[in-house]
Amino acid sequence: MAAHSIAFDLMTLLDAPGVGPRRVRKILETWRNSRNASLSDTDLLRGTLTAAQVASLPESRERVMRHWEELEKQDIHVLSVVDPGYPERLKNALDDDAPLLLLCRGNQDLFRTQSVGFCGSREATEKGLATARDTADLLAREGINIVSGFAAGVDMNAHRAALTSGGTTTIVLAEGILRFRLKKEIRSDWDEHRTLVVSEFGPNLPWSVGHAMQRNRTICGISRALILIEARANGGSIQAGRDCLKLGLPLFAAAYEGMPESATGNEELLHHGAKRLMKSRATNRTNIRHVLEAVTSARVTIERIQPPRQEIPAPLFRE
């Protein structure tokens, strides 16, 4: 089965030395137009790959086969961008920056659930962490899936709050999915039926800053709004907020008295289009009304203005 799957062939191409997503997209486009050849057809590849790259494919295929067998053992599914189960929202939102492959463990139905992303500092203040927990808890109780990056701090507090409230959560990794391990903070609340773990990277690739930045865009791509808890003036969190605004996704930045240095980026983003996320005086809890309104509005807008597209997104790796 693996040897004949589109996802397997795409993973093989991306494993080959010097072959990045742009070339693989070109091959995929040619294949989709021809429909008479497989993605591993040498004649189809010669127009895009060098002779040396074509010659390296058997070795890449062997490596991918070993990874694929381990993926199957762990019940990890690989979705290619042309598979029906690939999230349409992600393709529509990121276009050519959407991943060619998604490696998934858990409940893939969560791709079709209304989701809100969370991003913020690994070293957020206790007030920031409390805001993350409270907001995630309230949204999860409204049936919203909580999406974040499984990092310490804001991410982990959002994931755990979603699960302890009986809700669902999606973890988007900045490393290969075979490196995923449950952290002790979330182990007691873990439920395979209410979680989805996703990676767009090679199965055994290590974490990197570049992967983390790329992962944050994917969080935006599968979410209908983004909650930013505390962002410094530089780094991954504020860049996620900037990307969110560029994509036209509703962005909510936490605002409270005595904002710490770890949240200086929040003010910048509030000046550029983010909305304030504040407590309700009536309940002394986060006011999520505008977030829920934005999620509903985003769903309607996407369905009306951005119908399913045929372009081939990217990237498993950067060229």
Image: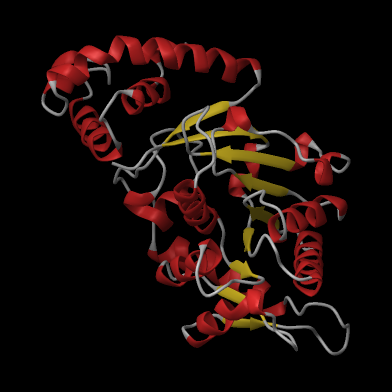
Q: Position of residue 178 (x, y in %)?
A: 60, 27
Q: Is residue 213 left or right of residue 144?
A: left
Q: Nearer the viewer, residue 107 or 14?
A: 14
Please state, as top left, top right, bottom left or bottom right, where the C terminus lies in the image: top left
82 lies above or below 189: above
Q: Is residue 181 left or right of residue 137?
A: left
Q: How is the image coloured?
A: secondary structure
Q: Quadrant of residue 186?
A: top right
Q: Position of residue 224 (x, y in %)?
A: 56, 63
120 lies above or below 176: below
Q: Please name the residue shown 80% across and 74% down the image.
A: 127
Q: Please name the residue shown 86% across and 43% down the image.
A: 189
Q: Please name the residue shown 55% across and 72% down the image.
A: 297
Which residue ends up furthest to the front in the rendered image?
261
Q: Is residue 236 left or right of residue 276?
A: left
Q: Please name the residue shown 69% across and 54% down the image.
A: 145
Count of marks overlaid on the render: 0
Q: Position of residue 89 (x, y in %)?
A: 48, 53
Q: Is residue 141 left or right of residue 294?
A: right
Q: Position of residue 101 (x, y in %)?
A: 44, 35
Q: Quadrant of residue 57?
A: top left
Q: Nearer the viewer, residue 208 or 305?
A: 208
52 lies above or below 169: above
